[in-house]
Amino acid sequence: MSVVKQDRRKERVDRGIKVRTDGVYAVSSWAEITYLLLPRMVLILGLLLAPVVLTAFPYWQRVLSHICVYALLAIGFDFLANFVGLVSLGGGLYIGVGAYIAALLNSHYGLPPYVTVPVATLAGAGLCTVILLPCLPLRGVYFAIVSLMFPLLAPRIIEALDIFGGTDGIVGLDGFPSGWVEQYLMIGCVLIAVFALRRMVTEDVGLVFRGVKDNDQAVKASGIDITTYKALGVFIAAVLGCLAGACLAHIYMWAGISQFGLDYSIIPIAATVVGGGGTLIGAVIGCVILVPISELLRDFGTLRIAVYALILTGFIVYKSEGIMTYVTRKYEQFERWVEI
Amino acid sequence: MEILIYGIINSVQLVLMALGFTLVYGVSRLPNFAHGALYVLAGYMTWLLVNRVGLNYPLSMAVALVLTGLIGAAMYHFILVRVRGMAISEIIASYAIGLAIIEGLRWGGLKGGTFTLPSFVEGSVSLLGVSVDYQRLIVVVAGLILVALLWLFVSGTKLGLGLKGMAQDEQAAMTLGIDSDRMAVVSMAIGSVLAGVAALVLLPLGSIVVEAGYRVLIMAVAVCVVGGLGSWNGAILAAFIIGFAQILTERYLGAHYQIVVALLAIIITLVMRPSGLFGRQKELEERV
């Protein structure tokens, strides 16, 4: 009795339809158009219809706004980490800066949300870029370490100087005119951010960004100033983060030091890792999964941070490709065993 | 005079906090972001052993240190070794483990000022006209002993020389038969024990709070970045610079600004001398 053991390996081959839709023949048949549009439409229509579906559950509509806030941050994190090569562990900085600027403009100068949000977005992003500027020559570990410190220090500084309302924060801000405006504004921003960034990273400027990540010496040797590009990358991520922060301040009608909190630093990272780094859409998917979990765990206090930290560790160690990369592979390729 | 004495004490505290972090980074290039969590964990385990299990104080300290070392080693052996060499994943994974420990402890009821460890020796002594309690003197003595022991271990024992070899050139060390994964586990265990020792010596000065986890991590990182990551002499020098700067700010500006000093020190160092005080040219290439 001997069992002949045949060695086999798994082979992955692109599906025919995937190959055809890659080229200019993409619009030659309905099947191919559907193949291309289906995944995109699931995301777009899913997000656009979500507020309508959730009309009966006002609490979950609010959660939807939170998902969008985190999704904006996560897209920024994913872009910065996987396309520019700067791992920023301090997403709370962007949220906090955006929220405080919007709150100050609203409470002190009485400007309405449709002025404060854009101003806070741009001014906040500029401010964050300037704050991070001295750290930009750093790579990898070093940048991560320093970026982690800013959101931990900002509350201490605000407490110490007792500025901007100190530990109480700034209360009594204007809200958005209605829940619908709030949700569709957020959803619109997320969709625009995802698709615009996806387009941008395949353009020339995206190529330079990836060059900075992969081999910055080569980029330097080509006569391109890498610090400018890193600053631009940080600015783009900060625009998304400050936009999220400014909206958050108006959603809660409040800005305070907890907006520099750990939640805003850790969830976007966890979402990106769970959803699949380097895909941008994966970051949104990760938020759609993790933020509701976080809401369900709200009664357990800080246990929820421990829970995502564990989910994050599990994914990064055992399934580092993430959901989006996995699903894309299944959608575009088929697998078969071949004998060798 | 008061500034001098408290400056030295504060600096030695920083040395204690940073020693484990810089050891692990120096040997295995792993930025152990769970360092602060291990610090809090060691303190909390000692408290549990004394107050819940009922062991006597020195014995529970010893048990807690051993457990901390084992937890550190297990963390590396089962989880972090899988992401070895991927800098981003290493940071995120170790930070996530640290967060899970810290926030898990916070949820488990570790909050408020109710958890305290007793001082080793009560009372205080007048030193050159400045009153210093014995615990703070013990901190300084413990710091000196620890640095001396570590130096003897690294330059005297075979295991220590192995660690040193790996810190200098991992591949050359491997060709000489040093198992790099085993050395990394050892370094992580020693680093965790060092975090634990720091906790046991420093915590009697205050109470055990989870926020200390973040504070210790920040201070350890600040000291290591200013001193040049992985460089022990640099770390000790940087601890003294930051330590004295903190005492001076506390004296003339207010205690709130203490932690701002750490950030300023980092930013100034990064702008002026990106590889840190004792960073070498090779490190400069890696980080900038």
Image: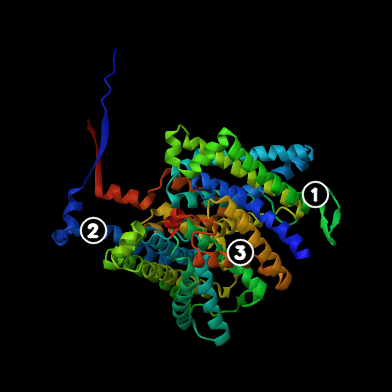
Q: Residue at x 65, y 57 (%)?
A: B211
Towards the viewer: B192 or A301: B192
Q: Quadrant of the N terminus of chain A?
A: top left
Q: Position of residue B224 (x, y in %)?
A: 56, 55
Towards the viewer: B35 or A79: B35
Q: Position of residue A11 (x, y in %)?
A: 24, 39
Residue position for label 2: A36
* Crowding near the residue tagged with mark 1, few <14, some 14–19, many ≥20 C-alpha atoms within 10 Å: some
Left or right, residue A85 beside residue A262: left
Q: CA distance from mark 2 to mark 1?
A: 68 Å
Q: Quadrant of residue A74?
A: bottom left
Q: How many marks?
A: 3
Residue position for label 1: B119
Q: Residue at x 85, y 62 (%)?
A: B129
Mark 3 belongs to which subunit?
B
Mark 2 belongs to which subunit?
A
Q: Amino acid at mark 3?
A: Ala
Residue A185 can be seen, yes or no: yes
Foreground: disc 3 or disc 2: 3
User: Where is A194 relative to A140, above or below?
Assistant: below
For residue B262, which numbered disc appears in the image?
3
Q: Residue at x 78, y 38 (%)?
A: B54
